[in-house]
Image: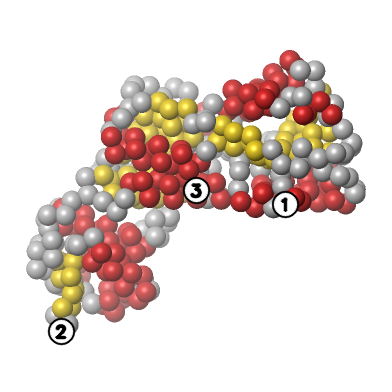
Amino acid sequence: MKKEIFSDFIQIEAYSATPKYLQLGDSIINAIENGKLKKGDLLPSINELSYILEISRDTAEKGYKYLKKVGVINSVPGKGYYILNTEFKKNIRVCLLFNKLSAHKKIIYDAFVDALGEQAFIDFYIYNNDFAIFKKLLQNKTNGYSHYVIIPHFVEGGENAHEIINTLPKEKLVLLDKQVAGVNGHYAAIYENFEKDIYGALSKIRLKLSKYHTIKIVFPRKSYYPKEILKGLKLFCQQYAFNYVMVNDIENEPIEKGQLFINVMEDDLVYLLEKIISQDLKLGKDIGLISYNETPLKKLLLNGITTISTDFKMMGTMAAKTVLSNSLDHHEVPFYITLRPSL
């Protein structure tokens, strides 16, 4: 096969979060499905592939190993790599959009990919909580996918998210982590109920919270976290007679004995811990601390940080099962509080 022809339909997207070796493998599979590659067709050598696509030799080799593993290509000494099987077909082709990368988002991604298995094609993009990037990605990705799996969190512009989401076929849509007001039709959703979740979690431990008179939630002005969290917390504080304070800037916020802090952003957790340590306050006695989203590190920090968190592994697995079954059901993911010495 001529190199220039091969490069016409085998492409690597620099801005995709999907590993390049998987992009390579899935592009070749897509070319087979579209009749551009046929059984017995020779493929470029690893060195040629590296040159044509401007990728590392290791990436090219890993892509070919992936294709050999799933039975699409084979190699013969002296002949090189060639198409072995054209009956292989990936009926599941997912456009996966995450708002950001983080420890708990990785848990969702890994669970989703593992549950789908190798027979699914996944295009993975991250839009960094930026609605303009989100909109551009979806406008450019309107064909060829069996499903769109979207985590819809934005710092600004999110009030218009339903407009671009409504342009997608609803039978292909899976909203993940959060519902979006204004999205119409029948579609799938695996989501958290942010207002109910925080209210319910704190209600379960309200007696343990009684040693604190004030609950401060660290919630930056420019945050992608849903405002429903604030509504649920405020309702809890009103019902159980806690003082309620929303803190936008933890660096300049005084901390005193008898206060319980709830943080949502990982960076703010670092500042808060530095303040507590510098003032020689005892965490879990003088000051209380609850952090959003369970991660392995929080089990170890200062003997353990109490967390409130959804089950991210379950969320990823449920999303994959929804895709595999073509379900249009809505599922609320369980929410847990994990008690540790910080409370």
Please state if 170 lies on the left or on the right of 219 as rendered: left
Percent x, y of residue 21: 34, 64
> For residue 263, what is the image quadrant?
top right
Q: Is residue 245 visible?
A: no
In-front residue for pair 127/62: 62
- The residue depicted at 60 percent of the width and 48 percent of the height is 295
Q: CA gap, disc 3 to disc 2? A: 43 Å
The first of marks 1 and 2 along the sequence is 2
On residue 107, the disc is 3
Percent x, y of residue 80: 18, 78
Q: Are marks 1 and 2 in contact (CB under 8 Å)?
A: no
Q: Amino acid at mark 3?
A: Ile
The first of marks 3 and 2 along the sequence is 2
> For residue 233, what is the image quadrant?
top right
Q: Are marks 3 and 2 in contact (CB under 8 Å)?
A: no
> For residue 26, what is the image quadrant?
bottom left
On residue 196, the disc is none
Q: Is residue 236 visible?
A: yes
Please state if 90 lies on the left or on the right of 105 as rendered: left
Q: CA gap, disc 3 to disc 1? A: 20 Å
Q: Secondary structure at mark 1?
A: helix
Percent x, y of residue 273: 78, 48
In-front residue for pair 290/31: 290
- The residue depicted at 9 percent of the width and 64 percent of the height is 39
Q: Which residue is mark 2?
A: 78
Q: Secondary structure at mark 3?
A: helix
Q: Secondary structure at mark 2?
A: loop
Q: Amino acid at mark 2?
A: Gly
Percent x, y of residue 15: 42, 56
Q: Which residue is mark 1?
A: 301
- The residue depicted at 36 percent of the width and 58 percent of the height is 13
